[in-house]
Image: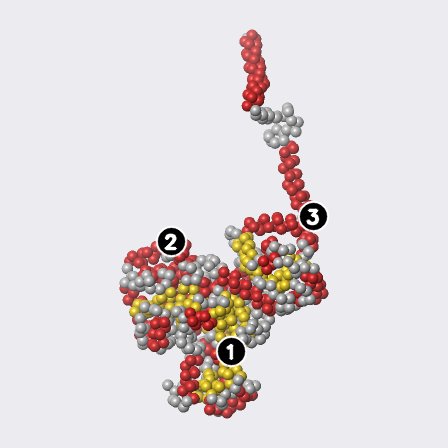
Amino acid sequence: MDQSRRSKGGRRASIRGARASHATTVPTIERKILARRGRRMRPAPRDEHDDPNFQVGSGVPMIDLWWLILGPLALLMLFLLAMWLAPEWTTRRVLGSLLALRYSVRLVNGEHVAQPGPLLIVSNHMSWLDGVLMMWKVPRRVRYIVDAGNFKAGWLAWLAKKFDTILMSAGPKGIARALREAREGLARGDAIGIFPEGTISRTYQVQGFRPGVMRIASGTEAKIVPCYLYGLWGSIFSFSNGKFFRKWPHWGRRHIDLYCGAPLPTDTNASTVRQRVTELEAQAMQDHRGDGKILSQRLIDSWRKTGSRLKAADSLGTEISGRQLLLRSLVLRYALRRILSRQESNVGILLPPGVAAVATNASLAFDRRVATNLNYTLTKAGLDECIRLGEVKHVISSRRFIDKLGMSPDAKVILLEELRDQIGWWDKLRAACCTYLLPGACLGWLLGLHRVSPDDLLTIIFTSGSTGTPKGVMLSYANITHNVDAVNCVVHLVEQDNVLGVLPFFHAFGYAITLWAAMCAPCSAAYHFNPLDAKTIGNLAEKYRSTILLATPTFLRGYLRRIEKTQFAHLNAVIVGAEKMPADLFEAFEQRFGVRPSEGYGCTELSPLVSVNIPARRSQTKHQVDAREGSVGRPVPGVALRVVSPEDGRELPVGEEGLLWVKGANAMQGYWQRPDLTEKVIQDGWYSTGDLARIDEDGFLHITGRQSRFSKIAGEMVPHGRVEEELGRLLSEGPEDDQLRAIVTAVPDEKKGERLVVLHLPLKQSIGELRQGLSAAGLPNLYIPGEDSFFEVVSIPLLGSGKQDLKLAQQIAAERARGTPPG
């Protein structure tokens, strides 16, 4: 037994010895082999017998753990040391690398801010990141003037000092000290940056510039460089959606453009510099007009998102959801494609505003055709003239509406009632599959919307003809998209809103706003074909709890007298245009319905919105002025204004009255088949409105008259509107009197060149009393028509849009002045 155990023990010892011998022999052999090949053998792994610092179970030496801890600390110490020795260089490199992950910034005309010498860089203020991004991308070292209240923290104050930032504290002394320091910097040849609005914009509009900021450059040789930073509105650092930070960030890199304008002289005032900044804004939005989804794709997405909720209703009793509206528009598109040839682009629509008109306009947009909504208030001759000028072969209408008009257009008429009978099950099945099964992007691709360019025509709208022969205004997808976005910025349409659509779609305001803006937004809309039918409009507003009304002052007077207070109980935004808003109407409407109207301005050639006062209940700011009664508001984002002398075209300073020119992404493509007329009104991208206006120091626009509504009498320009306004006051029977009782025009005169003529309804006072009233109102004798220039008419000539028919009024005045009886 003992011997066997010893033999086993011996075998175990011999095995251990063999293993030990193998452990020592194999590395030796391997080392020799590797030495012959010229390579070095890796050292054998150490264990606890070889390394006293080895920790069991870790597999990592203690010295490596120390490096893991001390390495980042060493890098942090190096960064802090670099920040101490070269803070600006370090911050630019580190911060620039971080910003590049989220932002792509492009300099446009960057040579203006790269030139040597003293510069005063003036920019708009849209977000908290404006200064950081400009510091990163402007090729020169710029010292910014900033609010000292934002740098109260010790490390921020230290960083501001290292960057040589000019801190402006509150109070006259703090402001004077900062301006003096900036002026000294310019004298040394520095580049100084400033945001003269003084605060971040809450409305996406460029606010008024602080009047004293331009004093920085006085007494120096500095050049003033206007800049516009585009692309930050909508980021979490801007005030879009009425709040900072508390919104979902934009996924992916945000592309920012910094537009730099040509340098201005040192003595340029703040208002002129602001004007140049807004011109850069207009250029930026024009350059980026193709960004985002095409308008018809937006419409698909909006209707799909609305789902089964009410999207549109009309006074005929039709109520329809978003998905049903999409389904109906697609079915109509398939049916129309069997009738209209592929080469037929312009298609007429003769329908009142309602669900059928919305679906028809949408179906033509989905088929990439140009819709021409015809003015059904014209005579048959006028209607046929628009069809001829617009090269319209087919007109879509309804039997019921044609019978009500009592006339048929001079074109092939497609009746919706007959078209309904031609729709088969295959059309309905295809439309249902596209509506309920296909994603919105796939549906848009199937319809070919990816081939639509922003500059492609969406519609042709014929001008009202109030001053001459109707002209076809060509409006593109980009034009209408600009207005849709502008309205959303001003009014902020939400799901709970209902737009009361009483303006016809042949009117640019009705087409762009009550059709496209309302349909592309989350809100709903209720339509009625007659804006003067106050009773039906009141019932619609009450039934659908309408919150937004777009109208003219003439329409509002009718609503004052005929609509019950409870029917307009939910209104919180009333926007008026097309004619001047009388001062008494503001008060009367607010007293009755509890909402004060806001005045805006536009014209067909500008898609049509140019400027608007933001309604008080829709305002998202308490710190900035976004409305000024008596004006027609500030320009909407992307629109620039310029006032020039009617005599020599010289640009006039702020506050002076002259001819208004407008530039922006909303400017039309031109007049259909009339390049000669287009060249007369559009020069270098600027459109001549024909209106006389002035711009105040805060950028609010004041319309003072129309160039065509002036008469040159004895060498002096006499405004028709001024005389008309005083006559309206004298003839008015109270604030609820909705009737226009007089219109002023002019006829040729051998002695004085022209003389004023008044067409009026039956009077309760004598003409002599009216003339005395005009004189008592302070009008010069030249402004007061003679007793032989007052002519009574049965009705004041008006257009279907509610505007005065100036052309017809002038014809009647000429006939009456010659002694011929009125027609």
The answer to whether 585 appears left or right of 463 in the picture is: right
Residue shown at the point (44%, 61%) measured from the top left: 454
Secondary structure under tag 1 reads: strand
Which kind of residue does numbered mark 2 sit on? Leu
Q: Residue at x 34, y 69 (%)?
A: 392
Quadrant where the N terminus sits is: top right
- In percent of width and height, residue 515 lies at 42, 66
From the image, tell me which residue sits under label 3: 85
Give the position of the C terminus as an image quadrant: bottom left
Q: Position of residue 431 (x, y in %)?
A: 34, 57
What number is the disc on residue 705?
1
Would you place residue 620 above or below residue 822 in this image? Answer: above
Q: Which residue is mark 2?
A: 438
Q: Residues within 10 Å of mark 2 (few under 14, many from 20)?
A: few
Measured Cα–Cα span from mark 1 to mark 2: 52 Å
Q: Mark 1 belongs to which amino acid? A: Gly
